[in-house]
Image (tube, coloured by chain):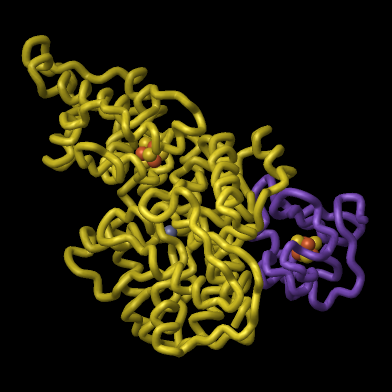
């Protein structure tokens, strides 16, 4: 599954941490309209329920720092164009 | 008579007596070609173990054999060294060749040693691997970012970490930068079974594997071993548990050599500790998951550099999971396939890495698995994270490749059922 969930309301400290782990050309975070778009893993675009049936806030594939942000988030969009 | 003023490097310098004999022992039977994942991916016998051995044997003969005596020992040309380097580094150091070798050549150690010799020769290590070394010189990890925040990536606040403990957890650079869910899963299971501690973040340097085995530069070892032993001892650690089999491999083989004897701590896999906790009734899985899973044995656990393989502990954990049915792949245990994600192949040959990873996923599918789990952070990044650092069309394509099975890390998979 390709995760392109949008991270919203990310603090400056969190952003710095995220940039320390997502720096390879293929998983760099993309900034758009104040959100950071994930570009992690591969395959079919995930629309917010992973292949273990978990939602973003509980998604086992996400590093803890990402899950922490997703847990307090209320509104979710997916994909580069924000589905 | 030798003309050059500077003493040139002797091609035999790094090789043990046994390895010199091994160069002569290869009978070119071709058995290893049937098992080599690089052969599967390239179909190119010019980069196979016998060709590599033959090429190096020629170097040795030209310097030390009859040829050298009759015609004078000539310096190996840069071009020939470069050609040799190309075929030597087209290899994931998986050790399959040594496992099946008809004459018992310890190929894995041989490839490590030959990489060292090439790295010290006038041609040096391959260009794309220099970045890893440059990062190490700055950050003490193969990645460009400082060690300071490593635990913030993956360690949840609810997991209790002791200040000192007999069990230490080292998530490795792979766990911190590439496979954070594996690190989190390991820490959850460890803390469910007993106390554990972590190294101070700035002292949790890379184990050295990516630089020493990957690139071939062994010069970092003395400093590395000194730092690691001190960092571990400071925390009262008796057993250092890890989630990267390559870390374990280098700790078991080269650390004692550079330390000058037995290490004051035992390197183990977290899965080995968890298997003991299960036996002792210290960990119970309460949730049920109805699915079929297969275990991928990472190369360095199936064919370690020293000592017996670690094959049963991962299976013990899987078999303890309620509802989960375990199936085996055609190639498992000692003959396991490589995922392709290691030994410098991600920067060097990303297209081959993708081919090898897909091959492994299809093998899991053929076994009837819903999920394939691994016990290695390098497999995790290759199969799940898919962060193959070098831009390449095959990697772009891999981003959209629909995987035939689900993929996960064993400890993370198990921790979800606590
Ligand atoms: S569930 Fe959410 S966080 Fe997980 S892969 Fe899907 S989109 Fe990404
Ligand atoms: S170590 Fe693995 S990849 Fe390298 S030559 Fe042997 S079988 Fe092939
Ligand atoms: Zn390691």
Q: Depth check: give the residue in front, B218 or B181.
A: B181
- Residue B205 image position (x, y, % from top left): 43, 64
Residue A54, quarter of the rendered image: bottom right
Residue, x 43% and y 50% (percent of image)?
B336
Q: Is residue B215 left or right of residue B385?
A: left
Q: Above or below — where is A64 with respect to A43?
A: below
- Residue depicted at 51% across the width and 47% down the height: B339
The quarter of the image holding the C terminus of chain B is bottom right
Q: Is residue B144 left or right of residue B101?
A: right
Q: Residue at x 40, y 24 (%)?
A: B45
Q: Nearer the viewer, residue B136 or B326?
A: B326
- Image quarter where ligand 2 lies: top left
Q: Where is residue B207 shown, x and y percent of the image?
A: 39, 60
Q: Name the residue nearer the viewer: B57 or B164.
A: B57
| Residue located farthest toward the top when viewing the structure as drawn | B71
Query: Which residue is painted at 60% across and 43% down in the image?
Result: B358
Q: Quadrant of the N terminus of chain B?
A: top left
Q: Is residue A1 above or below residue A59?
A: above
What letter labels the chain drawn in yellow? B
Does residue B177 show up?
A: no
Per the rendering, the colour in which chain A appears is purple
Name the spot of residue B298 as percent of width and height, x first. Answer: 44, 55
Q: Within the image, what quadrant is residue B164 found in?
A: bottom left
> Residue B397 at what x, y percent from top left?
71, 38
């Amino acid at each position: 599954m390709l995760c392109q969930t949008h991270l919203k309301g990310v603090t400056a400290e969190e952003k710095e941490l995220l940039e320390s782990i997502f720096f390879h050309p293929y998983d760099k975070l993309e900034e758009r309209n104040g959100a950071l778009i994930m570009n992690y893993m591969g395959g079919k675009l995930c629309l917010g329920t992973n292949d273990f049936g978990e939602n973003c806030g509980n998604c086992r594939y996400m590093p803890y720092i990402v899950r922490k942000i997703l847990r307090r988030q209320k509104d979710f969009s997916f994909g580069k164009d924000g589905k | 008579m030798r003309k050059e003023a500077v003493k040139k490097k002797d091609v035999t310098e790094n090789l043990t007596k046994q390895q010199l004999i091994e160069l002569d022992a290869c009978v070119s039977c071709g058995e290893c070609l049937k098992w080599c994942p690089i052969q599967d991916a390239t179909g190119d016998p010019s980069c196979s173990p016998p060709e590599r051995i033959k090429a190096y044997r020629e170097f040795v003969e030209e310097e030390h054999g009859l040829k050298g005596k009759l015609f004078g020992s000539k310096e190996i040309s840069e071009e020939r060294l470069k050609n040799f380097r190309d075929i030597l580094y087209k290899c994931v150091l998986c050790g399959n060749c040594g496992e099946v070798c008809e004459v018992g050549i310890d190929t894995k150690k041989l490839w490590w040693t030959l990489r060292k010799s090439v790295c010290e020769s006038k041609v040096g290590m391959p260009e794309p691997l220099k970045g890893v070394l440059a990062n190490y010189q700055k950050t003490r990890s193969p990645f460009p970012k400082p060690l300071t925040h490593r635990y913030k990536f993956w360690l949840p606040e609810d997991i209790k970490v002791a200040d000192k403990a007999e069990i230490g957890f080292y998530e490795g650079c792979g766990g911190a930068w590439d496979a954070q869910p594996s690190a989190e899963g390991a820490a959850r299971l460890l803390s469910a079974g007993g106390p554990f501690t972590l190294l101070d973040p700035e002292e949790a340097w890379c184990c050295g594997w990516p630089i020493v085995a990957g690139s071939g530069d062994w010069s970092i070892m003395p400093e590395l071993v000194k730092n690691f032993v001190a960092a571990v001892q400071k925390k009262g650690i008796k057993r250092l548990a890890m989630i990267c089999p390559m870390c374990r491999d280098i700790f078991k083989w080269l650390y004692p050599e550079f330390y000058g004897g037995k290490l004051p701590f035992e390197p183990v896999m977290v899965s080995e500790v968890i298997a003991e906790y299960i036996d002792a009734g210290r960990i119970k899985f309460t949730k049920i998951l109805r699915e079929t899973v297969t275990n991928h044995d990472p190369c360095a656990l199936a064919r370690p550099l020293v000592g017996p393989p670690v094959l049963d502990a991962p299976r013990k954990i899987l078999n303890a999971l309620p509802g989960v049915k375990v199936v085996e792949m055609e190639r498992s245990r000692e003959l396991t396939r490589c995922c392709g994600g290691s030994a410098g192949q991600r920067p060097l040959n990303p297209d081959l890495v993708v081919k090898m990873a897909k091959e492994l996923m299809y093998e899991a599918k053929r076994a009837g698995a819903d999920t394939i789990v691994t016990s290695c952070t390098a497999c995790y990044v290759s199969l799940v994270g898919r962060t193959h650092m070098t831009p390449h069309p095959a990697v772009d394509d891999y981003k959209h490749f629909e995987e035939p099975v689900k993929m996960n890390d064993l400890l993370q998979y198990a921790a979800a059922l606590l």
